[in-house]
């Protein structure tokens, strides 16, 4: 599992309890580099929108674009409710397998990941 960014890092024990080996990166560039090396089963990442982004809508578009070439890698994003409309626009262009609104309910996260393991 590739764990990218901040909100997602608090669930490392849950990921490990489900049997995932967890690699964490704190920058999108490093996460993309790791994605190309390890081909993870799951990517879990924070999604956010900043109005001052010049050429994109969110922090994740480069990582999501890189992940499109890995069809067996599941993509899970955590997002703020205020960013739902922007997330929907990104999802219309790039594959995201599941999105959980912050604060994430641990049982919902566990069931999402467990379903992907089954």
Image (cartoon, grey):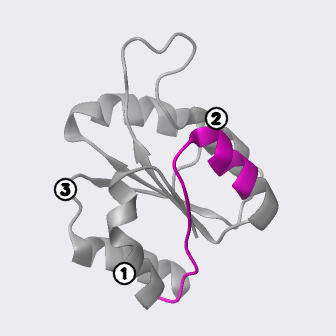
> Magenta includes 44?
no
C-alpha span from label 1 to label 2: 27 Å
Residue matched to label 2: 62
Label 2 sits on a secondary structure element that is helix
Mark positioned earlier in the residue sequence (1 or 2): 1
Q: Residue at x 80, y 60 (%)?
A: 37
Crowd band around label 2 with a 10 angstrom C-alpha radius: few (<14), some (14–19), many (20+): some
Against 54, residue 25 (above or below) is below
- Crowding around mark 1 (Cα neighbors within 10 Å: few <14, some 14 to 19, many 20+) is some
- Which segment is the magenta one? 18-34
Q: Residue at x 58, y 80 (%)?
A: 21
Q: Is residue 10 left or right of residue 92?
A: left
Q: Earlier in the sequence, mark 3 or mark 1?
A: 1
Q: Nearer the viewer, residue 79 or 2?
A: 2
Which residue is under mark 3? 103
Q: Is residue 25 visible?
A: yes
Q: Is residue 21 magenta?
A: yes
Is residue 68 visible in this depiction of the protein?
A: no
User: What secondary structure is marked by label 3?
Assistant: loop
Residue 52 pos. (x, y %): 41, 11
Q: Where is residue 75? Give x, y as percent.
A: 54, 58
Residue 72 relative to residue 18: left or right: right
Instruction: Kindly report the distance in space between the C-alpha atoms of the residues bearing marks 2 and 3.
Output: 24 Å
- Report the disc number at residue 14: 1
> Does residue 4 lie above or below 108 as drawn?
above
Q: Position of residue 98 (x, y in %)?
A: 43, 58
Instruction: Decide which of 2, 79 is in the foreground and name it.
Output: 2
């Amino acid at each position: 599992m590739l764990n990218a960014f901040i909100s997602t890092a608090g669930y490392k024990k849950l990921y490990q309890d489900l049997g995932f080996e967890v690699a964490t990166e704190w920058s999108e560039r490093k996460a993309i580099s790791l994605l190309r090396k390890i081909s993870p089963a799951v990517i879990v990442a924070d999604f956010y929108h900043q109005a001052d982004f010049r050429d994109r809508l969110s922090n994740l578009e480069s990582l999501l674009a890189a992940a499109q070439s890995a069809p067996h890698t599941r993509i899970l994003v955590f997002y703020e409710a205020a960013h739902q409309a922007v997330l929907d626009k990104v999802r219309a262009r790039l594959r995201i397998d599941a999105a959980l609104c912050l604060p994430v309910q641990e049982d919902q996260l566990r069931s999402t990941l467990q379903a992907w393991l089954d």
